[in-house]
Image: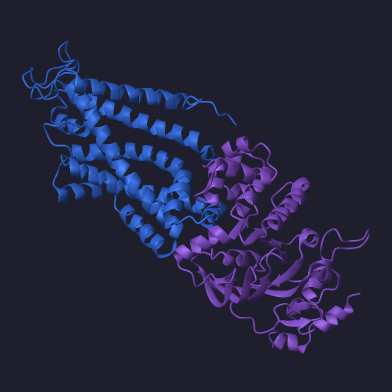
Chain colours: A purple, B blue
Amino acid sequence: MTPALAVQDLAIDFQSRRGQVRAIDGATLSAAPGEVLGIVGESGSGKSTLGMAIGHLLGAGARRVSGDIRVDGRSIFALDEAGLRALRADELGYVFQDPMGALDPTRRIGLQIKAALGGMATRMGIASVLKDVGLADADRVARSYPHELSGGMAQRVCIGIAVARRPKVVIADEPTAALDASIKSQILDLLVRRCRATGAVLILLSHDLYAIRKCSDRVAVMYAGRLVETGWTAAVFARPAHPYTVMLLQSAIGRERSGGRVEPIPGAPPVLTGRCQACAFAPRCRWTEQACTAVRPEARCVADRDVICHRAESVMGAAR
Amino acid sequence: MSTGIRMPFHGEALARAATMALAMLIALSILGLTTSFFGSPTALGGPPLSAPTQGYPLGTDQLGRSLLPRILAGIRVTIVLSSFAVMIAAMVGSLLGILAAYLRGIVDEIVARLADLMFSFPAILLAILISAILRPGTPSAISAIIIVTLPIMIRIVRAATLAVAGQDFVIQAQIAGAGIGRILALHLLPNVAGAIVVQAAYSISFGMIIESGISFLGLGVQPPGASLGSLLHDGRLYLSVAPWLVFAPGFVLAITILSVNLVGDGLRRTIDPVLE
């Protein structure tokens, strides 16, 4: 079966006035139709860049160094402008962090949904998009401007827009981070439900480990532009194979016991200027050995996991 | 959110007064143009340099032409010239500013440097230069206003677009399959239209100053036509014997420019209250 999304050894540089920065450093990833894939990692790990790269939506400063991205078997780098536009419209959906910023303040909701649906939009079609995301008063919402909606309603609209054309891949970048805490899980449930209903792969970019654990089938952990560990969500959470995953889980808020401490990961993620020649996590890692600072680890399969770590076996063994 | 129709410039007494003043000036000049109620702006034959009398409410000039209809004609010329020029500047400036801010890179670099270059000449000097090159007359006054107001328009629109173009809804439009034309026209333009309108109002008043300046120097509107600036030009020779020839058009010019500026302020406060 063709994966709905396949990222192969992708490397992306950003050219800025201060020099070159490697944002994605050999990311490999694939997602089967209908699955929910969570991508976790701290700020600056390259999650958002990866998400935008999938739609070929990175600005002029970004340059692909190597690798490929295939959406439904088609390389996005091989398409011309018209093909790319068609691919975005037909196969991709995005949900952003701030729903207010994702809706054009000068256009009514109905019109924006119509644009997302493409040429064949009818009033019924628009209403059904809104009803499917739990907005019962579809006519009123369709007539509204974005500022007339609450944040939660606006994010529902955005989810509706993202899945309107039944895309193959939906990319959600921190879809609940800007929302009121009381509706976060509702909106996340809705997003997952709509993606499963339309058969879209959901790529959920987040640093909310609990959200990821709750709703993703598989999880990929991103660090310094690479996906350092990928596996079934339950397995990764139970027995992490990469030191970064271990420390990420330990630092998660909500897991602490009474009287215990939340352990932050010491240090900060590196800013790469080119291909990392060793393990990017080595300076912050407690399992570091000589090979870690000398040899760039490659992806390998350890037990049920794809992991990029020289010491994955020991790390996995250490977990209870 | 209120959806009812609101009076323009709600709570803006000055802007309202200015709008009324402007409307009155325009109405008067239209009356002067379409009826002979105020007399003809070009008819000779009155007593030369007459002080205001019953037959000539604002006096006459050195050729015996009644000043009032000439001022009314001048208002029209000044407003129409400036507005027409600014309309062109606004269209070109909006297109360039939006394109530059959206595309960034080399296009942005070229447009921004071009605007800087145009900016670096003193406005009046540039206007005189253009008039001198193009031969004095109305077209050169229009060109001068366009060239002088264009860089400001480009900068304002570019800055406004930069703030908008980074928002996710532009990406959302791309994802919906929109091409550059659609994004520019349907998403970016409406979101910066407020800034364009406000800047256009200021540009019109600036344009009037430029036009008056050029015409005062004798490089703009040529006789027997009249603009407020050319009336000042004609009247300055007789300042000591017939001061009304300078005071009346000068006063009207000041009121017109002040009104346009106040309308611009009101527009800005109405459209973008954050700036206050």
Position of residue A181 relative to residue B198, above or below, is below
Residue at point 58%, 43% (across, down)? A126
Tell me if residue B198 can be seen: yes
Examine the image and state in which quarter residue B246 appears: top left
Is B19 situated above or below A73?
above
Q: Is residue A151 visible?
A: no
Q: Nearer the viewer, residue A42 or A148?
A: A148
Q: Residue A317, position in %: x, y? A: 88, 80
Q: How many marks?
A: 0
Observer-nearest of A21 and B265: A21
Closer to us: B125 or B12: B12
Is B66 on the left or on the right of B104, as rendered? left
Q: Quadrant of the N terminus of chain B?
A: top right
Q: Position of residue A252 (x, y in %)?
A: 81, 63
Residue lying at 62% horizontally and 67% vertically, measured from the top left? A50
Q: Is B67 placed left or right of B199 in the picture?
A: left
Q: Is residue B156 left or right of residue A173?
A: left
For the view shown, which residue lies furthest in the left direction? B45
Residue at the spot x=18%, y=22% of the render?
B69
**Could you tell me residue B126's position as x and y percent?**
25, 50
Residue B29 in the image: state x and y as whole percent.
24, 24
Residue at the right extreme of this rendering:
A259
Tell me the residue at 71%/48% (across/down). A179
Q: Nearer the viewer, residue A57 or A30?
A: A30
